[in-house]
Image (cartoon, helix red, strand yellow):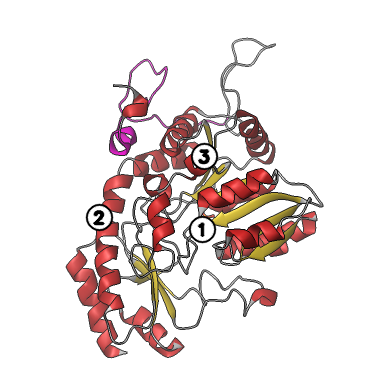
């Protein structure tokens, strides 16, 4: 059987963990070195300096490319570093068309960093492909979205947006952190660039911050590599090792968390104290059909409303098994109030348009026992 024919679970485990290593270790060695001795003074070998390339990171990058169906991947010291490297593909005067529901850190980058670089971002409702097309001008060089979005879990039709971006000669970049390559492969749907905050599902244990970019086109790969090396934002050897280690259990972690999330979504949707539940795995979700077409599950993130800011605070603080923390994709469950936490950095000018409501809670479901998680939620809902 060839690599291409293997199913995802097999690919996660069966890869060359130690190319060219004389001892054939079954896990990837941590090449914790900044520099590499060269055999000749007038020609560099495969590795010379770890900012430019490191064998531990190379195994990880090759594995990420294989899992996402790309030709080349690049790993960074955070998701934001990966997003920033993507933005470096643009120049002053270029425009981006994006969605108004973005990760808070990305909003901040767009509004307070890209503006100083002379790059203009236009926000539309990206679930409406026609709205994206209407916002495109000759200066538009990139369409940038997340799907599902965060925290409302709205779903963008990736193939449709890819077609529009292509028609207008714009790069199409998508942040796929909420799904991971296990549940969704945007390159196969026509995207040019997939970005992951590997801090989330890919590393999976809340112990590393890391990011990744995966591309299909070789020329684009060269441009991203140049950026990664020029700005020195690549992931270090030890974090690359932790990333590789976390990745092996991606499928079983997401399977377990997603099973619980589906049950929790159904429980919350039928609870009298809960207003709306946002989860793309629910048949009642506004974008359920689009999501079904382009992804292989609803994931392990959901949000819901509880009527007031006071109730949201009481709920978040009363839970035992959901710690109050930023982030998602960890083995441990957590809860956050997006307005106060992940989205507190949404710039003031955008508040009102993109601000999550004060009673919105976001759950990041881990791999604890489903019944325990539901019992904890049930107990707290009775108290609010
Ligand atoms: C967390 C997150 C990021 C930023 O990643 P870091 O690793 O925290 O820098 C970007 N996009 C999404 C969707 C995220 O959830």
Residue 197: image x %, image y %? 49, 51
Q: CA distance from mark 1 to mark 3?
A: 33 Å
Taking the spot 29% from the left edge, 58% from the top edge, the residue there is 258
Q: Quadrant of the C terminus?
A: bottom left
In reply to whether residue 381 is colored magenta, the answer given is: no
Q: Which residue is mark 2?
A: 256
Magenta segment range?
A: 7-34
Residue 117 appears left or right of 103? right
Q: Select label 1 or label 3 by which is in front.
A: 1
Residue 118 appears left or right of 33? right
**Residue 367 at least partly seen:** no
Quadrant of res 343: bottom right
Taking the spot 37% from the left edge, 83% from the top edge, the residue there is 275
Q: Residues within 10 Å of mark 3 (few under 14, many from 20)?
A: many
Residue 143 appears left or right of 182? right
Question: Label 2's element?
Answer: helix
Q: Which residue is mark 1?
A: 156
Residue 271: image x %, image y %? 27, 82
The answer to which of marks 1 and 3 sits earlier in the sequence is 1
Q: Select label 2 or label 3 by which is in front.
A: 2
Q: Main secondary structure of the magenta part?
A: loop
The answer to which of marks 2 and 3 sits earlier in the sequence is 3
Disc 1 under 8 Å from ligand 1? The reply is no
Q: Which residue is mark 3?
A: 236
In reply to whether residue 31 is colored magenta, the answer given is: yes
Taking the spot 57% from the left edge, 65% from the top edge, the residue there is 104
The answer to which of marks 1 and 2 sits earlier in the sequence is 1
Q: Quadrant of the N terminus?
A: top left
Q: CA distance from mark 2 to mark 3?
A: 30 Å
Residue toward you, 167 or 125: 167
**Residue 337 at least partly seen:** yes
Question: Label 3's element?
Answer: loop
């Amino acid at each position: 059987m060839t690599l291409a024919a293997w199913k995802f679970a097999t690919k996660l485990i069966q890869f060359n963990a130690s190319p060219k290593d004389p001892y054939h270790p079954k896990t990837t060695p941590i090449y914790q070195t900044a520099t590499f001795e060269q055999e000749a003074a007038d020609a560099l070998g495969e590795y010379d300096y770890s900012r430019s390339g490191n064998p531990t990171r190379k195994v990880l990058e090759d594995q990420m490319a294989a899992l996402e169906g790309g030709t080349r991947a690049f790993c960074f010291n955070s998701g934001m570093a990966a997003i920033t490297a993507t933005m470096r593909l643009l120049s002053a005067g270029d425009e981006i068309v994006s969605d108004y529901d973005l990760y808070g850190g990305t909003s901040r980058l767009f509004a307070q960093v890209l503006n100083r670089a002379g790059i203009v971002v236009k926000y539309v409702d990206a679930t409406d492909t026609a709205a994206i097309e209407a916002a495109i001008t000759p200066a538009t060089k990139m369409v940038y979205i997340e799907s599902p979005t965060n925290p409302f879990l709205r779903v963008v039709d990736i193939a449709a947006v890819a077609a529009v971006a292509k028609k207008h000669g714009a790069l199409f970049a998508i942040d796929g952190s909420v799904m991971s390559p296990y549940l969704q492969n945007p390159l196969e749907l026509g995207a040019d660039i997939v970005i992951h905050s590997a801090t989330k599902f890919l590393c999976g244990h809340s112990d590393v911050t890391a990011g990744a970019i995966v591309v299909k086109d070789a020329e684009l790969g060269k441009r991203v590599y140049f950026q990664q090396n020029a700005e020195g934002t690549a992931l270090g050897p030890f974090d690359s090792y932790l990333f590789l280690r976390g990745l092996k259990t991606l499928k079983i972690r997401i399977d377990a968390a997603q099973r619980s999330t589906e049950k929790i979504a159904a429980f919350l949707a039928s609870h009298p104290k809960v207003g709306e539940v946002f989860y793309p795995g629910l048949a009642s979700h506004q974008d359920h059909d689009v999501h079904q077409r382009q992804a292989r599950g609803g994931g392990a993130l959901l949000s819901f409303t509880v009527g007031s800011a006071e109730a949201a605070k009481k709920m978040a603080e009363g839970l035992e098994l959901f710690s109050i923390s930023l982030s998602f994709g960890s083995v441990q469950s957590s809860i956050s109030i997006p307005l106060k936490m992940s989205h507190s950095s949404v710039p003031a000018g955008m508040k009102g348009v993109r601000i999550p409501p004060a009673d919105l809670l976001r759950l990041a479901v881990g791999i604890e026992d489903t019944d325990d998680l539901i019992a904890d939620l049930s107990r707290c809902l009775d108290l609010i």
